Structure formats: structure tokens, C-alpha cells
Image (spheres, rainbow, N blue to C red):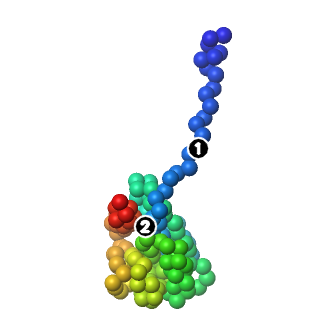
Amino acid sequence: MVVGWALWPTAEPEPRQREYRAETACLLTGTAGVAAPEARPVWTGMQEASLATQVKVQFLEVDGPQTGENAETFLASLVQSRCGVILAVGEAPVQGVGPTAARFPAAKFVAFGAATPGPNVVVEDATDPETVQRKARELVTALASSKD
């Protein structure tokens, strides 16, 4: 009888909801989303930082024509979502950063690719996936550090 009691299955602990900070880092990608080769290291770095800092991360794909002009609409929606930093990767999202940043000077943008830097736009080289992943991780981590 004692053996049966010792082998009785124990209840699994209740799943717990992850507690996030108030800050959010957002990523805008092309239509292929975070599965695109150029977006994968950015998203991976963002997720790594989120696990370490509890900063929320989210992504949005440009739907429809893959043009900078169309991407501007999606970037503006991320600004309206109160993203602490908006990362853009892929041709159309990166093209949309400049005009959107000009319309929203209080928002912070990071373009991974060929873009023009500005007062609220940082441009990062997107050629080395390891460097891109590290930089994305640093950007999200910095968002948490700036609010501590």
C-alpha cells in the first residue's frame, strides 16, 4: 500500500502567465514575416532580449504591395501602438522608415539595411546575421535599461 502511494502521480504545477514590463519593441518585416532570412536574426535577437528583460516584443508584416509607401502605413500603426523602439527589416519596411520618422519625430526607429540616418533613425548594417542578432538583442535590452 505504501508503494502505491509513493508512485501516485503528482499534479502538474499550474502554468503561469509571463509578467512583462510596460515597454514594447516592435519589428516590421516584409510579407514573409519573421521567417524571411533577413528578418530571422533580428527577431531571434529580440526574443532573446525579451526572455532576459521581460520587454514585450511583437512583429507586424507589411501586407499588400511591398513598397516603402505601403510600409509607411504599417510603421505608423506601430508608432500608434506606443512601441518604445521600432525595428525595420526588408526592402519595403526600410524604405518606409525615413518618411515615417519625419512624421513622428518622438518615435525611435532602427533600420536594418540601406536607409538614411536621422535624428530618430539609426541605420544598422544587415549583412552579417550574427551581428544583426546581437544588435537587435542590445536594442531591446537598452529599452529595458532606459526605464529602470
Name the residue located 35 percent from the left edge and 73 percent from the top edge.
127
Image quarter of residue 9:
top right
Q: Is residue 111 above or below residue 131?
A: below
Q: Nearer the viewer, residue 43 or 86?
A: 86
Is the C-beta separation of discs 2 and 1 under 8 Å?
no
Indicate the secondary structure of the residue bearing disc 1.
Answer: loop
Residue that badge 1 annotates:
15
Farthest residue, direction top: 1
Q: Is residue 107 visible?
A: yes
Q: Position of residue 67 (x, y in %)?
A: 53, 87
What residue type is disc 2 on?
A: Val
Image quarter of residue 102:
bottom left
Q: Position of residue 134 (x, y in %)?
A: 35, 63
Residue 49: image tag:
none
Farthest residue, direction front: 148
Q: How busy is the neighbourhood of tag 1: few (under 14 within 10 Å), some, or many (20 plus)?
A: few
Name the residue located 60 percent from the left edge and 35 percent from the top edge.
12
Residue that badge 2 annotates:
42
Question: What is the distance, in whole Å, between disc 2 and disc 1 at their CAs?
Answer: 28 Å
Which badge, 2 or 1, comes first in the chain's sequence? Answer: 1
Q: Nearer the viewer, residue 1 or 106?
A: 106
Indicate the secondary structure of the residue bearing disc 2.
Answer: helix
